[in-house]
């Protein structure tokens, strides 16, 4: 099979493998850390969680990144990306250990959220840097398959990390602090794995570097405007449309995640521990969907093109999401977790490929940081909308239908843009022959 052959070729690339190790360890630690936070905030037996409380927690953890994110992009286009992975993961290991200490003690909630926020903020540098560095270790011909394997493997690592977190929590009699310490250890391992690559390997090129931090921060607004102008150029409008569509799909994913959390906490389980196990199963199935997406997307992109594959994913979600979600029963929701994992990751692989192939290397760090900011804002916005619409037990047919409508709008909008682009291409071809 071509996909298997390409995977074998990629895994023989030494520096691709090393970058992949960093991603697997880093995102595996993310999975451990996120499960510990979810268990501590949502599924603690002594807490009566509401959709509004979940939305507030997401806002506290993610919205401040809207301030950090643009600076992350500017710095990523000036700092050695390998150094970002080394020092970023080391810092996260120390911060995660601090979070564990706060969990074990009796501290104000704001102090706990501040610690978690710092880990999340550093995470933005790591993920944006991993995406921006990928074209430095893979040739253009295999970029689609690399985008299938690398981010999907990272997501699977996060899912495996979540499963490991559940196991450690069970063995440690429900100690969330012990789980966070495991995450800190994995962050440290990601830091050590980064040291296996040369500092200049992952770029950006030396002539693009501006080593003085004060100069970089002072030029932030100008550089971001330049990146947005770069994205708005006619040759890169496909990347802009893909980013906008993926942002809307992220909104849908966020709304459905809050709905799933509330259903697992109250409607579908008899208690917090059973609800946490049900949530773990749903997330594991979603991870399996990511794995299927990694296998299917290269073939689908080869047949349809990346933009049309996003159209197919969003159209499928518009049809299947209400059919599986409206019964509000365990079995259909678990199937929905698998299907939406496939659809969301398939669309993300195609979006990453479009952005990487249309955006110049010197702008990739900034564009991917804007990408992350849009993701976070969409996620928090979705949590806020879900908080307004969800009843206490999480059963909201209106929210399920709203999400289906948004998926349909994405499919129709991208199909229209694709049709316009193909029509313009044919007109140019006609002029060439006259």
Image (cartoon, grey):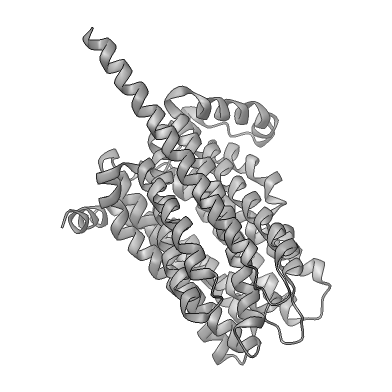
| Image quadrant in which you'd find residue 45 | bottom right
Residue at (65, 86) in percent of width and height = 272
From the viewer's side, name the closer residue of 262 and 12. 262
**From this viewpoint, which residue is outermost toward the top?**
434
140 over 128 or under it: above or below: above
Q: Is residue 227 left or right of residue 9?
A: right
270 over 95 or under it: above or below: below
Residue 93: percent from the left, percent from the top? Answer: 59, 66
Q: Is residue 83 visible?
A: no
Residue at (81, 80) in percent of width and height = 106
The N terminus lies in quadrant? bottom left
Residue at (21, 53) in percent of width and height = 6
Residue 74: percent from the left, percent from the top? Answer: 59, 36
241 over 344 or under it: above or below: above
| Image quadrant in which you'd find residue 228 | top right
Q: Is residue 337 left or right of residue 104?
A: left
**From this viewpoint, which residue is outermost toward the right?**
108
Q: For the image shown, how many numbered marks are present on the structure?
A: 0
Residue 356: percent from the left, percent from the top? Answer: 41, 39
The C terminus lies in quadrant? top left
From the viewer's side, name the closer residue of 317 and 254. 317
Q: Is residue 347 visible?
A: yes
Residue 84: percent from the left, percent from the top? Answer: 53, 49
Residue at (65, 68) in percent of width and height = 396
């Amino acid at each position: 099979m071509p996909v298997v052959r390409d995977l074998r070729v990629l895994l023989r690339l030494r520096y691709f493998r090393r970058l992949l190790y960093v991603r697997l360890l880093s995102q595996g630690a993310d999975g451990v850390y996120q499960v510990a936070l979810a268990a501590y905030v949502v599924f603690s037996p002594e807490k009566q969680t509401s959709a509004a409380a979940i939305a507030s927690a997401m806002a506290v953890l993610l919205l401040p990144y809207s301030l950090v994110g643009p600076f992350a992009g500017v710095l990523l286009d000036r700092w050695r990306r390998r150094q970002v992975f080394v020092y970023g993961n080391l810092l996260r290991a120390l911060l995660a250990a601090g979070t564990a200490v706060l969990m074990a003690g009796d501290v104000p909630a704001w102090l706990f959220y501040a610690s978690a926020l710092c880990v999340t903020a550093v995470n933005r540098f790591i993920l944006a840097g991993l995406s921006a560095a990928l074209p430095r270790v893979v040739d253009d011909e295999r970029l689609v398959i690399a985008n299938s394997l690398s981010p999907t493997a990272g997501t699977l690592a996060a899912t495996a990390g979540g499963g490991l977190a559940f196991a450690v929590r069970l063995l440690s009699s429900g100690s969330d602090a012990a789980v966070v310490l495991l995450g800190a250890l994995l962050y440290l391992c990601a830091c050590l794995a980064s040291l296996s690559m040369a500092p200049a390997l992952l770029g950006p090129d030396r002539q693009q570097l501006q080593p003085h931090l004060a100069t970089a921060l002072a030029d932030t607004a100008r550089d971001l405007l330049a990146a947005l102008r770069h994205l708005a150029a006619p040759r890169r409008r496909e990347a802009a449309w893909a980013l906008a569509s993926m942002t809307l799909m992220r909104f849908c994913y966020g709304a459905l995640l809050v709905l799933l959390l509330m259903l697992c906490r109250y409607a579908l389980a008899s208690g917090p521990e059973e609800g946490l196990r049900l949530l773990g199963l749903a997330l594991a199935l979603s991870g399996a969907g990511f794995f299927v997406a990694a296998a299917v997307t290269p073939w689908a992109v080869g047949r349809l093109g990346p933009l049309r594959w996003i159209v197919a994913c969003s159209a499928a979600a518009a049809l299947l999401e209400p059919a599986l979600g409206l019964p509000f029963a365990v079995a259909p929701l678990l199937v929905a977790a698998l299907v939406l994992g496939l659809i969301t990751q398939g669309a993300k692989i195609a979006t990453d490929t479009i952005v990487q192939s249309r955006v110049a290397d010197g702008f990739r760090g900034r564009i991917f940081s804007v990408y992350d900011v849009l993701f976070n804002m969409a996620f928090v916005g979705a949590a806020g909308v879900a908080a307004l619409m969800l009843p206490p037990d999480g059963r909201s047919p209106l929210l399920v239908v709203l999400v289906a409508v948004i998926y349909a709008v994405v499919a129709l909008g991208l199909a229209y843009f694709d049709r316009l682009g193909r029509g313009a291409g044919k007109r140019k071809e006609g002029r060439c022959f006259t």
